[in-house]
Image (spheres, rainbow, N blue to C red):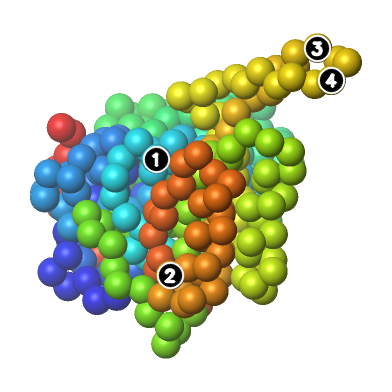
Amino acid sequence: MHGSNLRVAYQGVPGAYSEAAAGKAYPNCQAIPCDQFEVAFQAVELWIADRAVLPVENSLGGSIHRNYDLLLRHRLHIVGEVQLPVHHCLLALPGVRKEFLTRVISHPQGLAQCEHTLTKLGLNVAREAVDDTAGAAEFIAANNVRDTAAIASARAAEIYGLEILADGIQDDASNVTRFVMLAREPIIPRTDRPFKTSIVFAHEKGTCVLFKVLSAFAFRNISLTKIESRPNHNVPIRLVDEANVGTAKHFEYMFYVDFEASMAEARAQNALSEVQEFTSFLRVLGSYPMDMTSWSPSPPSSSSSTLSL
Ligand SMILES: O=C(O)C(=O)Cc1ccccc1
């Protein structure tokens, strides 16, 4: 995972956690700020960037659902993951006191991860969601807003000249976000180090189908690290004939599963060919090395202008 010449697109502005994740995955890469995730995806598709970095889940806030939908809508491949400890600060213009705040702005995950601490700090503030944490800090600085604080990183405070009113305000000290790295081409899976594989599927009609799909992994001792369901936009509802009960309506889902094996292993290949028997749709999103490292801060160099296509 060497990144000196890589251009890595992320959603947000310099100081965003996604930028730090790009730097962890590809040290010394050139991080390209984008105003939306869609733009980060398009930047890779149009060869403006080589990778996109996408936060998918957080130990406190849970899954970032919108981003799972994006993975399905686009045809990029997951080529890596990083887990990033997230340390939030409450930032405001120099001289602003906590007592005079009426509003706190941040990415929805930032607000969710600090919910209880904001209450404990005795702040009687409206919460407002914006696109990214560092963008919230930039907004306050650019518009000289004195009644509003941002939840963002200490690096964002430094970049936008804000003061840290409170440090480490996430509700749990071990607050970790998992990001995936996306590329136009998949990487060749290997067996010489721990790999993870991410798939998405829609199951066939029938009874206990989800159980049968998951048992394909259990029988081969393949651990699942994640399962997420999202509404299936193509088939939102399914009619099921249930004897003596009439016709029932069930929601239809797409299932996202991560498992601890490489697609280069026979047990993973066999599990997937079994899964295929019970699914109407199956896609391998990527087979990639597991992040086994701890956090090492090495901020990449971000371009000065934010990309919008
Ligand atoms: O807004 C950011 O800085 C992001 O990169 C998304 C995010 C927000 C909160 C925690 C982790 C990632």
Q: Residue at x 66, y 18 (%)?
A: 239
Q: Residues at badges 3 and 1 in contact (C-beta under 8 Å)?
A: no
Q: Residues at badges 4 and 3 in contact (C-beta under 8 Å)?
A: no
Q: Which residue is mark 2?
A: 263
Give the x, y percent position of residue 38: 29, 36
**Is 51 rendered above or below residue 256?**
below
Task: Determine the CA span between mark 3 and mark 2.
Answer: 43 Å
Q: What amino acid is at disc 1?
A: Leu
Q: Residue at x 51, y 51 (%)?
A: 276
Using a 10 Å C-alpha cutoff, classify the residue at mark 1 as few (fewer than 14 neighbours), some (14 to 19) or many (20 or more). Answer: some
- Quadrant for the N terminus, please: bottom left
Front residue of 204 and 40: 204
Identify the mark at residue 72; answer none if there is no mark: 1
Q: Mark 4 or 1 closer to N-term?
A: 1
Front residue of 187 and 87: 187
Q: What amino acid is at disc 2?
A: Met
Q: Which residue is mark 4?
A: 243
Q: Residue at x 11, y 50 (%)?
A: 47
Give the x, y percent position of residue 138: 32, 38
Q: What amino acid is at disc 4?
A: Ala
Q: Mark 4 or 2 closer to N-term?
A: 4
Query: What is the secondary structure assignment of the residue under circle 1?
Result: helix
Between marks 2 and 1 in the image, the one whose residue lies nearer the viewer = 2
Query: What is the secondary structure assignment of the residue under circle 2?
Result: loop
Taking the image as shown, residue 134 lies to the left or right of residue 26, namely: right
Q: Mark 2 or 1 closer to N-term?
A: 1
Q: What amino acid is at disc 3?
A: Gly
